[in-house]
């Protein structure tokens, strides 16, 4: 489960999590041993400090309770959903006009960088979601420890969502769609706990009719929904638009630096892409031979990855998977899927251990997220990855981070086609957006996330399109070898 260990992780003291009630000691007849459910325990010390970061962000007083903070963060999540839909609409209009990601990020100082805004929003949205998910997991731990049939903490989100709907009845469908992921997560934990089994993931059913209706509502009146859920004057909370304005400047600088020098290297001059802190150690896809494409998938492996692999096999395509090491570092997760990826000839690359914003980490944590993640590859797959992709692309221009990546004998890999599939749940829109960018660029690296049901469907649609177009689909290893004149790099990891 990708939520464990992400950038933010909240905490609720176990005694508070369940609250005091006379039924705490009631037992569920026939329930399986608690050992079946241990996979969801989280690092509570780490979670406590991260939850405090949320409190600081929101401006809420220290006297406010964790439930009150969670209710505030749920309102913030609705804001992020609205803003993401608004930005996706703007980006789609630009993609329709032939504008590409590398053109979007090459803005001058003081100019608006729409893509940087979107990436800043993504980091905020995912941090909030993962934080609330981890809080649910800690509440789950409390129920498990108490061996109680009451799961009060896991019902809390439903109560808070109900109150939000009562406050904003005209935005009920938006609230339902925007908060579906964290609600489904809490529900799956509760069901798994009560049935004495490891919780199943939520089904892949996507209510496209509702999603499309909400999107139209947002695009028609974006400011209306944002105002409804943003904190009012004097009220504690997070203004998403203000956060983006404050955070996106640094992101814009980083993105501009990535594409400042295109990775086009003549093949007859020897190895030109290799582990390095210079531009030679970063590849974006802009320097691929014309008509050459690489499909890449981030954040897995997950239960949806097997379907992606089946589709790739059906179309006889090799891809590159940027994996989170936490997803393969235990038999509780998906090491067997990683092994399958490798055996079937796909590139296996690193996407960090827990998907943090690496620039925000201290030196020890940074090494853990880069070199520590690599060690998991050695343990599970018997080899080190050649490529690394920073979560959110954050830190690619930071010398200390690039040094760690190069010391681990990896090249950093960005992308030049963004499908925006982490937010958009409509496979058709994801596919159309991808095709527009592919047609505008003619070569490059395509970004998907194999943890989403919509990505499974959209990426297979794109596979069919690319095969029909007769383009060459390669792994990053194959692309770099071709660019380097048939040579690969040699490197000894620095201990």
Image (cartoon, rainbow, N blue to C red):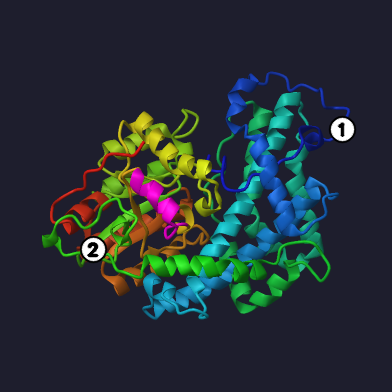
Residue 409 is covered by the magenta coloring: no
Horizontal side of residue 322 vs 158, given as left or right = left
Q: Is residue 197 visible?
A: no
The residue labelled by disc 2 is 288
Q: What's the residue at 80%, 70% (across, down)?
A: 232
Front residue of 58/322: it is: 58
Q: What's the residue at 60%, 63% (across, down)?
A: 210
Write down the quadrant of residue 280 in the picture.
bottom left
Q: Residue furthest left?
A: 268
Give the CA distance from mark 2 to mark 1: 62 Å
Q: Secondary structure at mark 1?
A: loop
The dominant secondary structure in magenta is: helix
Question: In the image, which residues are magenta?
Answer: 395-407
Q: Is residue 115 visible?
A: yes
Q: Secondary structure at mark 2?
A: loop
Q: What's the residue at 60%, 33% (across, down)?
A: 40
Decide: is 394 above or below 194. below
Residue 454, image x, y percentages: 46, 55
Front residue of 393/340: it is: 393
Residue 406 is covered by the magenta coloring: yes
The residue labelled by disc 1 is 20
Crowding near the residue tagged with mark 1, few <14, some 14–19, many ≥20 C-alpha atoms within 10 Å: few
Front residue of 254/467: it is: 254
Horizontal side of residue 22 vs 443, given as left or right = right
Q: Say which label, 2 or 1, has the lower sequence index.
A: 1
Crowding near the residue tagged with mark 2, few <14, some 14–19, many ≥20 C-alpha atoms within 10 Å: many
Decide: is 273 above or below 286. above
Q: Quadrant of the C terminus?
A: top left
């Amino acid at each position: 489960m990708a939520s464990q260990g992400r950038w933010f992780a909240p905490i609720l003291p176990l005694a508070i999590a369940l609250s005091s009630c006379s039924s705490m000691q009631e037992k569920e007849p026939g329930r399986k041993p608690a050992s079946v459910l241990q996979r969801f325990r989280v690092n509570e010390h780490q979670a406590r400090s991260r939850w405090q970061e949320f409190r600081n962000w929101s401006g809420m007083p220290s006297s406010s309770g964790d439930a009150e903070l969670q209710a505030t963060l749920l309102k913030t999540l609705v804001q992020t959903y609205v803003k993401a839909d608004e930005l996706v609409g703007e980006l789609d209009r630009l993609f329709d006009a032939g504008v590409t990601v590398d053109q979007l990020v090459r803005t001058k100082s003081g100019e608006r960088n729409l893509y940087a805004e979107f990436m800043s929003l993504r980091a905020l949205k995912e941090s909030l979601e993962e934080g609330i998910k981890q809080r649910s997991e800690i509440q789950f731990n409390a129920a498990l420890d108490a061996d109680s049939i009451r799961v009060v903490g896991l019902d809390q989100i439903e109560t808070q969502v109900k109150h939000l709907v009562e406050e904003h009845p005209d935005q009920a469908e938006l609230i339902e769609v925007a908060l579906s992921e964290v609600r489904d997560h809490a529900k799956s934990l509760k069901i798994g706990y009560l049935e004495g089994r490891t919780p199943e993931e939520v089904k892949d059913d996507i209510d496209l009719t509702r999603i499309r209706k909400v999107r139209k509502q947002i695009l028609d009146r974006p400011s209306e929904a944002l105002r409804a859920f943003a904190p009012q004057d004097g009220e504690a909370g997070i203004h998403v638009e203000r956060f983006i304005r404050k955070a996106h400047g640094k992101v814009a600088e980083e993105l501009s630096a990535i594409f400042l020098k295109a990775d086009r290297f003549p093949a007859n001059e020897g190895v030109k892409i290799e582990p390095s802190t210079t531009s030679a150690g970063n590849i974006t896809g802009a320097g691929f031979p014309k008509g050459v494409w690489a499909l890449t998938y981030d954040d897995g492996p997950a239960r949806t990855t097997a379907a992606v692999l089946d589709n790739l096999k059906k179309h006889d395509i090799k891809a590159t998977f940027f994996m989170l090491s936490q997803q393969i570092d235990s038999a509780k997760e998906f090491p067997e899927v990683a092994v399958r990826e490798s055996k079937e000839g796909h590139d296996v690359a690193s996407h960090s251990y827990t998907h943090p914003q690496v620039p925000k980490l201290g030196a020890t944590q940074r090494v853990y997220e880069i070199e520590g993640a690599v060690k998991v590859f050695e343990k599970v797959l018997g080899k080190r990855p050649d490529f690394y992709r920073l979560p959110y692309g954050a830190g690619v221009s930071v010398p200390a981070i690039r040094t760690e990546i190069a010391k681990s004998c990896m090249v950093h890999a960005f992308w030049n086609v963004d499908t925006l599939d982490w937010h958009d749940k409509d496979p058709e829109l994801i596919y159309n957006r991808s095709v527009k960018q592919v047609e505008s660029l003619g070569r490059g690296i395509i970004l998907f996330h194999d943890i989403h049901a919509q990505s499974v469907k959209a990426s297979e649609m794109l596979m069919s399109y690319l095969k029909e177009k007769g383009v060459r689909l390669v792994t990053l290893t194959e692309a770099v070898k071709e660019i380097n004149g048939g040579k690969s790099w040699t490197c000894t990891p620095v201990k």
